[in-house]
Amino acid sequence: MVDRERNKALLLELLRAAGAGNSQCADCGTPDPEWASYKLGIFICLNCSGIHRNLPEISRVKSIHLDFWENDVVEFMKTHGNLCAKAKYEAKVPLFYYIPRSKDCLVLKEQWIRAKYEREEFVATSVCHERGSSASAGSREGFLWKRGRDSRQFLKRRFVLSAREGVLKYYTKESKGPKAVISIKDLNAMFQTEKIRNPHGLQITYSKEGQTRNLFVYHESGKEIVDWFNAIRAARFHYLRTTFPTAPEAELIPKITRNYFKEGYMEKTGPKHKEAFKKRWFSLDSQERNLLYFKDPLDAFELGRVFIGSKEQGYEVQAGLPRGVRGKRWNVGLTIVTPHRKFVFVCENEREQKEWTAALNEVISQPVTA
């Protein structure tokens, strides 16, 4: 019992130790991790510990608070730690490679953990996963399951990505030309596992003739879909570095790909506020400052958009609805005030209203950059 309590206290000291990096999960950055891999010598969160359990040849986990820790295992943890592991297993992570955070989906976290510890892709001596330049890493060819625009079934399609050509193409039949040729300049990708209802679901978006278009894809292999995602990021990074050669890399990295800031259903009415309210799916793109809307979450084409300018330009969000205006089914409203008109929406409940208001206000608070 003395050893149990003493060793638990020693582990908690290691968690708080300055300069060890142990106060955040070694894999996703979640604060105050309560688990550890005693084979790798790292402190991890509950969610990442579940992934480590599936790698018994590489990692073994224990709870800091609930499990018994032997003296020699605690000594091993003392001589290792998160920063020590990072120096070894993340020595050569490419700048474009997406490092998942706590809120990211399971497939991103699992493949990050497997890439680091199982495949050792980023150790300094690794030769099994040499990526070279972002241009070479941004080239990929293979099959993905793509949701059909009309049938709404997922159909197998061949995709070809080339950073050097600056395009992503996909084909419906081998003997025909590409169904679409998408400029990497206009390309974005984000994991949408819940919306697509697939644990490997990826949403690819691009702009064509001023309109946002969506492709919804997945692959049976978690590694394959994450490799596609990072290949798209490599191609985007190559484009950004080529187009903006003097821009600092730290400035370019957030622009490689982006998630929507908030998504969900609201009802909207027309410019006179007398038109019938219609339920629409909204996606807030904070980087492009657009509030996009669709009939359904998995629509291929947007129905329209509202540009969200800055406070200095006369944009603001107001809670509530104009006098005499009522929604069709919901009545918790918000109004986006622009220099030209007021856009009126209603939300399902007050929580959604507050979340949309906060998200829109955060975009409005940011100055518009050229």
Image (cartoon, rainbow, N blue to C red):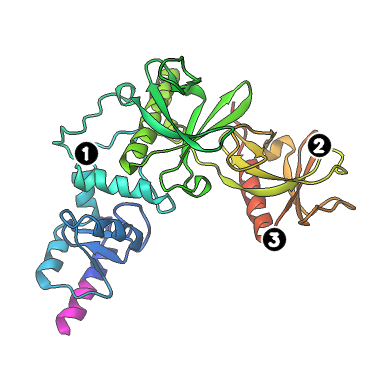
Q: Which residue is mark 1?
A: 121
Question: What secondary structure is the magenta-colored segment mainly?
Answer: helix
Pointer 1 or 2: first along the chain: 1
Q: Which quadrant holds the N terminus? A: bottom left
Query: Along the line of sight, which residue is nearer the eye, 221 or 306?
Result: 221
Query: Along the line of sight, which residue is nearer the eye, 46 or 300?
Result: 300
Figure quadrant of residue 296: top right
Which residues are the magenta region? 1-10
Q: Residues within 10 Å of mark 2 (few under 14, many from 20)?
A: few
Q: Which residue is mark 2?
A: 341
Identify the amino acid type marked 1.
Glu
Q: Which residue is mark 3?
A: 350
Residues under numbered marks 1 and 2 in contact, where contact means CB atoms less than 8 Å apart? no
Q: Position of residue 243 (x, y in %)?
A: 45, 18
Residue at (53, 33) in percent of width and height: 148
Horizontally, residue 21 falls left or right of residue 317, namely: left
Residue at (34, 25) in percent of width and height: 141
Relative height, residue 257 to residue 136 (above, below): below
Horizontally, residue 12 falls left or right of residue 138, namely: left
Q: Position of residue 246 (x, y in %)?
A: 41, 21
